[in-house]
Image (cartoon, coloured by chain):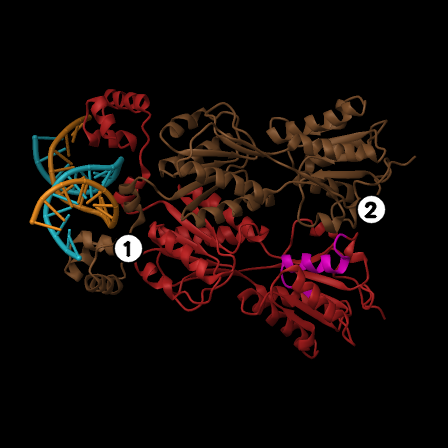
Chain colours: A brown, B red, C cyan, D orange
Amino acid sequence: MNDVAAAAGVALKTVSRVVNNEPGVNASTAERVHAAIESLGYRRNDGARTLRRGRTASIGLVIEDVADPFYSGLSRAVEDIALAEGCLVFTGSSGEDPARERELVLAFCARRVDGLIIVPAGTDHDYLTPEVEAGIAAVFADRPPGAGPDADTVVCDNAGGARTGTEHLLAHGHRRIAFLADAPSIFTAAERLRGYREALAAAGLPYDEGLVAMGRPDQARVLADLRRLLRLADPPTALFTGNGQITVATLRALAGTAGPVPTRQAPPSAGPVAIVGFDDFEPADLLGITVIEQDPVGMGRAAAELLFRRLSGESGPPQRLELPTRLVVRGSGERRPLP
Amino acid sequence: MNDVAAAAGVALKTVSRVVNNEPGVNASTAERVHAAIESLGYRRNDGARTLRRGRTASIGLVIEDVADPFYSGLSRAVEDIALAEGCLVFTGSSGEDPARERELVLAFCARRVDGLIIVPAGTDHDYLTPEVEAGIAAVFADRPPGAGPDADTVVCDNAGGARTGTEHLLAHGHRRIAFLADAPSIFTAAERLRGYREALAAAGLPYDEGLVAMGRPDQARVLADLRRLLRLADPPTALFTGNGQITVATLRALAGTAGPVPTRQAPPSAGPVAIVGFDDFEPADLLGITVIEQDPVGMGRAAAELLFRRLSGESGPPQRLELPTRLVVRGSGERRPLP
DNA sequence: TTGAAAGCGATACCAA
DNA sequence: TTGGTATCGCTTTCAA
């Protein structure tokens, strides 16, 4: 910028005025400055600008894994809103590791992002308190924060969705419904379990722990649990799967590795098992899988809107938004148990 | 940092030394400084640091759409390597819009990112030349840059993969193979078309433009094109679909909106149509779809490694990496035409 | 309408 | 081992 000023024969400040379209610059002076900018290939250094102005016009987004379609949808929504607000987005995946979440968040804070959108991996967010006190706005998405500052939060109606899905299976005559999900330490999984239990209780059915399998969402774990479930003396006739990954892993387990159409194949011991999954996933319609759909894009948008509202000065107590879910009927959840 | 220095009763520079773990500080002095840092809740401002040091320890990643599983896999790989290198990542989706690509890239450059990984949406990258000359390293992924600076590039063997896929269908007796893909203005689509044509030519078959349908990857376009193809007097007995999105859209079109198992359903006029798709997609195994698999994670990793090699000073002419593809046989590509 | 000087929060170089 | 001072590139404040 100094060079530009020298080349144009004006003061530094005048160049600054031109670059920022500030009023009060003679047209001919501005012209000279523009010419100098052009010939020197000058670009403003936003880092320096930021340092002086206090706001970095950037936000940090920490999710579990960008490569998961749920979070990538959320991510895209956040990105779009941020861009519209003239903000850039640092993105980081925690991989469900609290230490990495913390590391990312603190790195973003060191860059003095204006705000954060966090899908918490851990349950302890005390490390955020000083940052929030220092003026960094934070919004939690998908899961509420654990211990730590009270902040705006957007979640979906996990319990309600699971209740609806379970009720749907009950309405189709099932009495032995297995529940496969993430580890109960994860908020969404715990909430969905609650919804499942509520539905059973409302129907006057006992809660059988032997029908519940929670843990890591990988193929091996799901396969092992499914084997156990289907070999029970009184096996389930229906499955409620607690998220998209687990639904796919379940279908894969039922099908054999690269088998043909899984939901058509009856596991030998159990008759054609009915399935309802939490989360819609890309070709669930092709597979005919009945799901409880939530809206990752809507969640990202809601979180970003909350954040930017705070950034533009809105105060008031932290808000908690709960987005609705929707049952999408496609066939797999409407199969009745064998008589 | 000034406050910390005052509180600890030392000079600014000493605090800087402690914060950066520089050698040559008395243990007891360091102790005092740490105490002051703790009690003031001080965090280094990386923006200021960056301004002084010249390197921002951040890179920019511009892809077509984070929400597309192909790019989100790539994105995650880039993120992981960047984090390991102590670098943060600005992510932006261009949505296949050259203007938005440019806007994002220039915004990243204004923040003085150390490097860029770009999946080009446009074909004109002249706007990058001054930035590259100013010292910002750039690597192109998935598609080579158009006009503009010559830079490192990572692509996959698009033509080879399409050739293999087409040959596979030819080997199973098909002579009328349709080609559905992205618009030919997109590098990958043009290359895949080339591979398809090469395979036909090698088999001594004519190239029939009526069997080629290229354009936007949305459901409506694919449905319309598919209708046209299957109503031809001499309809195709096999389809080669040019990317994951189009494969899914095709399956959906063949199935009817939420129909059951699409690949089992014969379109009325054409017999059971065979399908090979470019790109693996999450439950392609469940659907039994034969695909040409490429490796988005490998591509992201390769691009990031190239970039960081440049950032650590490696010079030499721009490299061009071409990653291999692999045929994955699952059933849909091995159906023979009706006699 | 234009400019000079101070300062944002750190690091680098040289001196003590 | 420690400190002073210039400086990174820009904005802000105040004066001309």
Closer to the eye: label 1 or 2: 1
Q: Is residue B244 magenta?
A: yes
Q: Are marks 1 and 2 on the same chain?
A: yes
Which residue is depicted at the point 31% across and 46% down?
A47
| Residue A128, quarter of the rendered image | top left
Q: Quadrant of the C terminus of chain A?
A: top right
Nearest the eye: A314 or A141: A314
Query: How would you rate the neighbour count of disc 1 (Cα within 10 Å): few for under 14, some for 14-19, many for 20 or more?
Result: few
Report which quarter residue B266 is drawn in: bottom right
Location of residue B7 (image quadrant): top left
Of the pair A307 and B295, the residue shown nearer to us: A307
For the N terminus of chain A, the image quarter is: bottom left
Tag 1's secondary structure?
loop
- Which amino acid type corresponds to the residue marked 1 in the rendered image? Asn
The circle on residue A264 is: 2
- Measured from the top left, where is residue A41 in percent x and y? 27, 61
The residue segment tinted magenta is B240-258
Q: Which mark is residue A21?
A: 1
Residue A145, given in percent of the width and then of the height, sits at: 52, 28
